[in-house]
Image: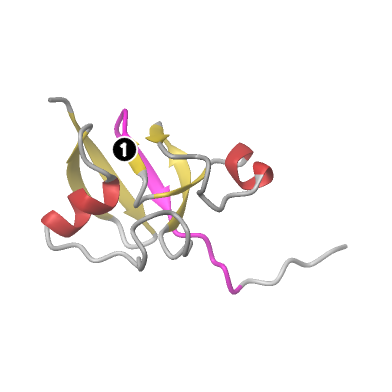
Amino acid sequence: MPTHQITFLPTGVVFEANEEETILEAALRQGIKPAFSCRSGTCRSCLYQIVIGHVSQEDLDYILLSKEEWAAGRRLICCSRPKSDTILEKPNQNRKKIEL
């Protein structure tokens, strides 16, 4: 089965994930502990921004991502499987948007 290199930003943590497992499963298997809670796409704790690469995300019927988030490349790593080497960045969810 194909494996891909996954990089988490801003930490720079790099690990391997195969296409048969979720990115979260691969991280946990290798002792990496990203934020997560439900493992089913409903809590949004594991939300990441795709910087480079491609992932597939299954079970879209109940995953809590808006159309805008999806279009912007945000994905939940508990439900995403890598399809290429991928760089993901944890969005700063505490940052306030400033309107000019």
In the image shown, does 9 or 71 lie closer to the viewer?
71
Q: Can you see residue 53?
A: no
Q: Residue furthest right?
A: 100
52 to 33, vertically: above or below = above
In the image shown, does 89 or 12 lie closer to the viewer?
89
Q: Quadrant of residue 10?
A: bottom left
Q: Can you see residue 20?
A: yes
Residue pictured at 32% horizontal, 62% vertical? 11
The prevailing secondary structure element of the residues shown in magenta is: loop
Residue 89, horizontal then vertical, whole percent: 43, 54
* Quarter of the figure that contains the N terminus: top left
Residue pictured at 34% horizontal, 52% vertical? 78
**Magenta region, residue range:** 82-94
Residue pictured at 45% horizontal, 59% vertical? 90
Colour scheme in use: secondary structure
> Does residue 80 show up magenta in the picture?
no
> Does residue 90 show up magenta in the picture?
yes
Dot 1: within a 10 Å radius of its alpha carbon, few (fewer than 14), some, or many (20 or more) residues?
many
Q: Would residue 17 be found to the left or right of residue 74 on screen? A: left
Q: Would residue 47 be found to the left or right of residue 2 on screen? A: right
Residue 93, horizontal then vertical, whole percent: 57, 68
Q: Would residue 98 be found to the left or right of residue 29 on screen? A: right
In the image shown, does 14 or 77 lie closer to the viewer?
77
Residue 62, horizontal then vertical, whole percent: 51, 48
Q: Give the amino acid type for the residue marked by disc 1 in the picture.
A: Arg
Question: Circle 1 — which element?
Answer: strand
Residue 23, horizontal then vertical, whole percent: 28, 47
According to the image, label 1 marks what residue? 81
Residue pictured at 43% horizontal, 54% vertical? 41
Q: Would residue 37 be found to the left or right of residue 1 on screen? A: right
* Quarter of the figure that contains the C terminus: bottom right
